[in-house]
Structures are given as structure tokens and as C-alpha cells.
Image (cartoon, rainbow, N blue to C red):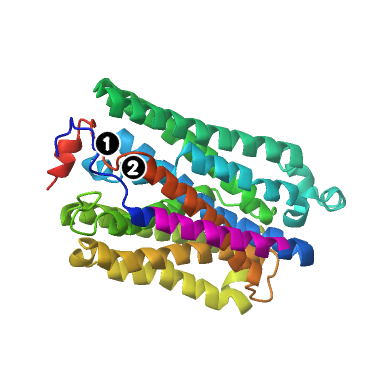
Amino acid sequence: MNPGSNGGSHLAPESVGKIGRIGLVAGVAGLVLLAVGFATNKDQLFRSYLTGYMWMLGLSAGALGVLLLHHVTRGAWGVMIRRVLEAAASPLTLGFAAVAFLPIAFGTHSLYEWTHGEVVAADAILTHKKPWLNTTSFLTRSAIYFALWIFFAWVLSRLSARQDETGDRRLALWMQRWGAAGLVAYLLSMTFAAFDWLMSLTPHWYSTIYGLYVIIGQAVAAMALVALAALLLGEGRSPAVPFQPRHLHDHGKLLFAFVCVWAYFGYSQFIIIWSGNLPEETTFYTSRLNGAWKATTVALVLLHYALPFALLLSRDRKRSAKALAPVAVLLLLARWLALHWLVAPSFSKDAFTIHWLDLAAPLALGGLWLFLFTLGLKARPLLPANEPFLKEALAHD
């Protein structure tokens, strides 16, 4: 393909629309189940919703982080998947995430111990943290996070659309500059979002590496999504995106790297707390390494690291979309388990729990997100025709 062409032959196949419609139906069905949960068990609804929400958000936020990284590095690896990342981290999907945050905003009293005035008044540590952990500042910061993410997604989307229309090579430089600023803003804002939305579920406990642990998990989710999109868009006699084994190999290696870095951050957090052996720090792990949650911890290590690590060692598997897809599905399921492992023990330390609402929440949010994601894929040609590095990416060896 000539980089200067309009890219009209690289449009999303009809199967993308069908998948989007399936997602919409699943999302609506999930919403009905959530409504039943709200009427029958409001506290459990908010807890399950938080896990499902963070799983769904990880797809968009992770894609935004990888997209920003691509623009900063200008690597050929990112050109072929740029439209997938732009659709996943679009103002539409991130705007949906902002709206979908509203139940969490209304459910803070059911989720966070620090919203109970009598508890805070009787606890010196929570009183000390009150200037940060209070409902007004929590909601204000959350609004700032979403404003930043949507803003950078909008800027990159506008510049990308202008590049398609005009072919102005200077726009690539502007995307690189905005990508650098956006990457810093994303890393900082998502770190604090992880502190606010997840770590404050256990307000006496803290970890300075927690934000990076959540961020790299989102990157795993984003690259797993890319692997599934490569199967959908790169198959058939006339693939929508001409993925070659070398392209898939690049994406598989990046997924492999993110899996390893996730394990590294998780182990680093654990070993530092274990070696310090301070009661206020070890409480997070004692409830997860002993008793009812011990098996879940072992399963998480196996499903999120050991098994994907072993499977992704294979060069042939990383060069095949069909072989890579099962690993991607495994990691997306493991991402939900990782978030459930972060959230649920905060409310049930002595008993392992999976409520039916824990499944309804990702069904609802994931289904609606998938529908919006497919709308983004169908909106524009799947290759950025006027990207200066497109020819290099297509010939990438």
C-alpha cells in the first residue's frame, strides 16, 4: 500500500459490527442484572461494580498508555495497531468510563471506610489522612483524572484525523510532543487514581509501588486486546490490516515484557513489605496469603504470570494470531482475577467470595465498552495512510 493513499481498502470488516452488537446485547443484559443487584444487595453491588469497572477501565487506560508510548518512541511496532489503540482509548470510550464512574461516586459510603465520620473520628491515622481521604477531594481528583485522560485522547485523535486528511508530516512531530506530555500526565494521574480508588479500600495500608503495579496490569490488558484484534482484523483472504508474522512477533514480545514487569512490580512490593515486617504493612498480604484467599493468590501467580510466561516463550506462538489469541483471553480473565484479589479481601478477609454480581458487572461494562470500541474501529480506515512511518512499518523486518 502506498502511504499516500487514502487507506479506503483497509476498513473494518462486517464481523466487527456483529461483535459490537453482541457486546451491546450482553451489556444491556448485564445492566438488568445490576439493577436486580441494586434492589437486593446494594453494598455487594458497589463492591462488585468497582472490580468490574476497574477491569473495563484498564482496557481504555492501558490502550491510552501504550498509544502515548508509541507516539513518544515513534516505533514501527505501533503503526499497525494505532487504530486499535485509538479506538480503545478514544474520547468516546473514556467518556463512557467517566459516566460509568458515577455509581462508584454514589457508593463511596459502601466502599470506603474513610467516608464514615464516626470511624474517622475514632482513628488517629484516618484523622491524619482526612485532608486527602474525604469525599469532596476524592470526587474532585477523580474528575481531574478523567479530564486529563479524555483531553489527551481527544488531542491525539484530532491530530491523527488531520494527518489522514492533509498528510502534513509535521503532525507526527506534534503527536510525539503531545505523547510525551500525555505519558507523564497519565502515569501520575493513574498512580493517584489507583491510590484513591483501590488502595484506600484498606486506608491503613500503603505501598508506593502500588500505582505502577496497577498501570502495568492495564498495559497487559491493552496488549491482550491488541492480540485479539489482530486475529479479527488480520484474517481472511483480504485482511483489513495486513499483519505479518513479524508484526505479531513485536506485539507478542511487548505483551511478554508487560507480563514480566507486572510480576516484577508485584514481587518487589511483596518482598519489601515482607522484609520490613511491619504490622501496618503486612496486613494486606496476611489476609491474602493465608486462609480462604491463599488458593486465589496461587491461582493469580499461575494464570497471570507463570502460564503466560511459559506460553509466550515460544517464538512461533508470538508470530501467529491464532496461537496468541488464547493467551490473550487467559490474560484478560487473569486481569479480572487480579482486580478481584485487590478488592474483595478488603470486605471479606476470612472467606473467599465470588458473588453473581461479580460476573454481572464486567458483563455489563465490558459489553457496552466493546460496542463503543467497535464503533471506533469502523469510523476510520484501519491504517493511518499518511503516517510517515507507514511504509517502514509495512516493510518492518
Dividing the picture into quarters, in which one does residue 303 lie?
bottom left
Disc with the residue nearer the chain's start (2 vs 1): 2
182 lies left or right of 114 = left
Neighbour class for label 2 at 10 Å: few (<14), some, many (≥20)? many
Q: Which residue is mark 2?
A: 83
* Residue at the image point whose x is 68% and y is 35% from the top: 140
Residue located at (45% from left, 34% from top): 153
Q: How many marks?
A: 2
The x, y position of residue 170, in whole percent, is 27, 20
The percent coordinates of residue 326 (x first, y second) are 34, 69
Q: Quarter of the image containing the N terminus?
A: top left
Circle 2 SS class: helix
Q: CA distance from mark 2 to mark 1?
A: 7 Å
**Marks 2 and 1 close (CB-CB < 8 Å):** yes
Whether residue 383 is situated above or below residue 275 in the rendered picture: above
Q: Residue at x 27, y 22 (%)?
A: 166
**Overall secondary structure of the magenta stretch?**
helix
Horizontal and vertical percent for residue 72? 32, 34
On the rendered structure, is 80 left or right of 160?
left
Residue at the spot of label 1: 384
**In the structure shown, which secondary structural element does the residue marked by tag 1 occupy?**
loop
Span of residues in magenta: 17-35
Write the residue at 21% across / 41% down. 76
Q: Does the magenta-highlighted stretch encompass residue 27?
A: yes
Relative to the observer, which residue lies in front, 22 or 283?
22
